[in-house]
Amino acid sequence: MDTLPLAGKTALITGASRGIGAETAILLARLGARVAVNYRSRAPRADKIVAKIVEAGGEAFAVQADITDADAVAEMISQVKSLWGHLDLLFLNASGGMEKDVPEDYALMLNRDAQVNTLTAARSVMSAGSRVIFVTSHQAHFIDTAETLPEYRPVAESKRAGEDALRALIPFLNADGIDFVVVSGDMIVGTATATLLNRINPGALAAREADVGRLYSVEEFAAEVVDAATAPIPGENIRLVGDVSSFASR
């Protein structure tokens, strides 16, 4: 029997109780990785993903942490260390900023500061040969030239700020033998963000799909995210998924 390509590898995915993060967790487990499914508050969702992985013969556990809480992040990494001793793959997938009743600077707290803090904490259990994958959107990556819906712009701006802050750490990561790659996609059909934007602006998804030919599903985009965990690092450490012809390269 052939060895699974990620057998023996350990992975932590932030924001993995639904959407792209959940599908990423399932795909990683199918390839043999042991997976930590991070969630902020919806334990039943995370438990469901873990159960699906375990029932299929994989290994996973759910770990609660609001990544804007430094102490919670430290405890999450402590749990990973206690169970596995090390971390091979860190997927910085959690994002947001359109929630109600949050501080005015919440988008930056989550999409920039929390991303940097999570990576900083995780470095204590990562070593040469490990990899960090930051998941973002074309509307954020190409923020200076991209047209995006007004409701999403604060999120896009904060996610680009997060990408810039993380990319500034690449030389230090590489010095320790840790790889870093950004995976960027267009609006992803089936995600909470795309659904909400389409609800606020009816027809937004259809209009975007008409512009680019087709939009990726959650499953399709998650497959790209997982592939980025093992594929050679692309130029400028950025993997652009789908058609980017409507965006000017930065």
Image: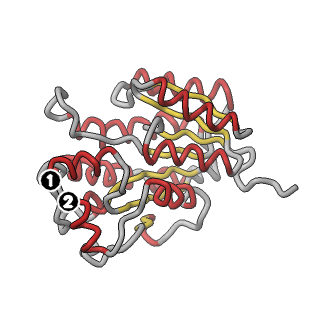
**Which mark is on residue 204?**
2
The residue shown at (47%, 44%) is 21
Task: Kindly identify the amino acid type of the residue bearing the numbered disc 1.
Answer: Asn
**Residue furthest right in the image:** 1
Q: Secondary structure at mark 1?
A: loop
Q: The N terminus is located in which quarter?
A: bottom right
Query: Horizontal and vertical percent for residue 164?
Result: 31, 54
Residue 247, compared with residue 20, is above or below; it is below
Left or right side of 91 for 242: left
Residue 30, compared with residue 249, is above or below; it is above
Query: Horizontal and vertical percent for residue 36?
Result: 58, 34
Residue 203, compared with residue 155, is above or below; it is below
Determine which residue is flagged by label 1. 201
The residue shown at (42%, 65%) is 238
Question: How many labels sit on residues?
Answer: 2
Query: Horizontal and vertical percent for residue 54?
Result: 68, 34
Residue 45, compared with residue 221, is above or below; it is above
